[in-house]
Image (tube, helix red, strand yellow):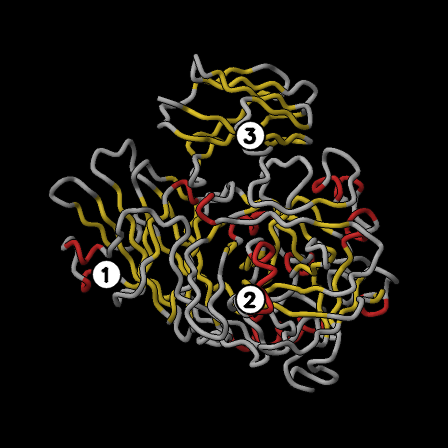
Amino acid sequence: MPRHVPIIAHLWLLLGSFATAQEWRPITTHGYMPETATPEVVAVPFDGVAAALDDVRRASEGRLWLHARFVTCTVDPITGGAWYTAANGDRLWRAALRSPGAHAVEVFIEEVDIPEGAAFMVHDGLGGRMQGGYTADHAARSGTITSLPVEGERLVLEYFEPAGSSFQGSFRVGKLLHTYRGAADGRTGACMVDVACSEGTDWSQQRDAVVRIRVVVPGGAGFCTGTLMNNTALDCRPLVLTAFHCGEDSEAANFGSYQFLFNYQRGCGTGTAPASQVMTGCVRLADSNDTGPQGGGTYGSDFLLLELNNVVPPSFNAFYAGWESTVFAPANAVSIHHPSAGPKCISTFTAPATDASWAGFTAGSHWRVNWVPTENGHGVMEQGSSGAPLFNASKRVVGTLTGGNSCCTTNGCGPQTGPNEPDLFGKMIYHWIENPNPPEEKLYLFLSPTGNFSQQNGSYTPCGGIGIPEQGSLSRVELQYLAAEHSLAFTCAGCQGRIRLRLFDTTGRVVMERAVDALTRTVLALPALGSGTYLLVADGIGAHATLRFVVTG
């Protein structure tokens, strides 16, 4: 049984994440540096034969389908590229990076240490859509910034540093992602149903919770689908649920380069999907730990829970999905997903799901679902759909996609595949407590931290209601905004180690970050802040809390 339907993935030229209001343009358009002065660095040749052999192995082991592989491409502002100093003292650096034969390329900028006001921009050097500017705020905890795909085998990387910067920035490029397979136009199977069609009319809230995930593993990258999940603490914690087999091969450092694309959808069978609402970086919180001869999901229900590095910007209008941990089979509802990593689609089932196991290993770990034809098609699953949510009639998540045999055409995706063949979703009730994972990684600890609840509704604003509380607590953490002193008071009696405090503005930008002693009460003076609402997030071993407060005048 295939992990998921082997339809080739799609690649796009995308806008950069958290694009600033400033219009970023290539250095050459400012008259600073002629195009002919751009040194080119060529990557180590891509080994297509080795990639093909490894693809066969990965498929046989139920691993994530990869569309791109890493190639070595090394340059830094000391040993390569070209610098220009403008008349006003601004410093600019530029290099072209090329991986011959690539369908698209992405750059990984590592060891980033740049001053305030400095930024990177990425583009194709031909006047195409720009990505930028990437500032220090975009760097993962590992100090890495990764771009989005640039079509073709070449991209241009630019670095701007304003005059009078407090220090000279440093960074290095160590590798590129070389896309070696995938459809450039992004078409999915002809039977697919866009979520904007009539089938999705009653599911607009749930639609806004579903995200496309660019997964990174040591050797390359692939795509999956995930869901932004609500929790009983109603603290807007940015938790994303997907499939374990999607991130099974990822190492700790890889999670900082995961990309989450929100609201990637188009009209019903027409139009262009916008691709500007992107967040980069997450940490792994828990998974099903159920690997085996058929990959993640063999001995359990195949779940992976991630937490985004930053809060979701309000401008994304994201919905935090509800969930239900129940033994009752969903009778009829939908799944919303990104087939072939393309725009969001919807698949419909009308007969009750049945109990199943992945590849016959663990009885009752999955729901078996058969899709039905609807007004605008016969939605099925494809590459990129893995991890997609299964919603029940109450519009709560009851499962996540592991894989199956559905396909737009009979035997079109291999033997015994077709539109009437089933797909299997790991059960939420099995995610909850039954998987062979450590006790501290049971899903209920994260989605139901305030009590043993079996269900939770979704919400666009799951942050303690309309009011802005001036203090909050969870897991022994106490936070308080002292308006008169313009400071924050922090206490976490009994916590272990250091606690990381991050302060976000309404755009999701980090405006302050500190590490404090978990055992003592600390009062921190805040930096100068403009009027508005801010969110403080505290994280540590066994501790998580959020506090929203308003700064006036």
**Residue at disc 1, secondary structure:** loop
Q: Is residue 151 visible?
A: yes
At horizontal 47% and vertical 44% (from top left) the residue drawn is 313
- Alpha carbons under labels 2 and 1: distance apart: 43 Å
Image position, residue 114 (x, y; %): 35, 39
Residue 50 quadrant: bottom right
Q: Secondary structure at mark 2?
A: loop
Give the label, 3 or 2, closer to the camera.
2
Q: Whole-percent x and y of residue 159?
A: 29, 49
Q: Which mark is residue 195?
A: 2
Mark nearer the N terminus (1 vs 3) = 1
Q: CA distance from mark 1 to mark 3?
A: 41 Å
Label 2 or label 1, whichever lies nearer to me, is 2
Return the residue at label 1.
Answer: 38
The C terminus - image quarter: top left
Residue mark closest to the camera, 1 vs 3: 3
Residue in view at x 77 percent, y 44 percent: 442
Q: Residue furthest right?
A: 363
> Can you tell which mark lies on residue 500?
3
Reply above or below: 416 against 94. Answer: below
Mark closest to the chain's N terminus, 2 or 1: 1
Give the residue drawn at x 67%, y 41%: 231
Q: Kindly identify the amino acid type of the residue bearing the numbered disc 1.
A: Thr
Which of 37/116 is in front?
116
SS type, badge 3: strand
- Can you say whether 436 is above or below 495 in the image? below
Q: Amino acid at mark 2?
A: Val
In the image, taking residue 410 as reference, residue 195 lies left or right, namely left
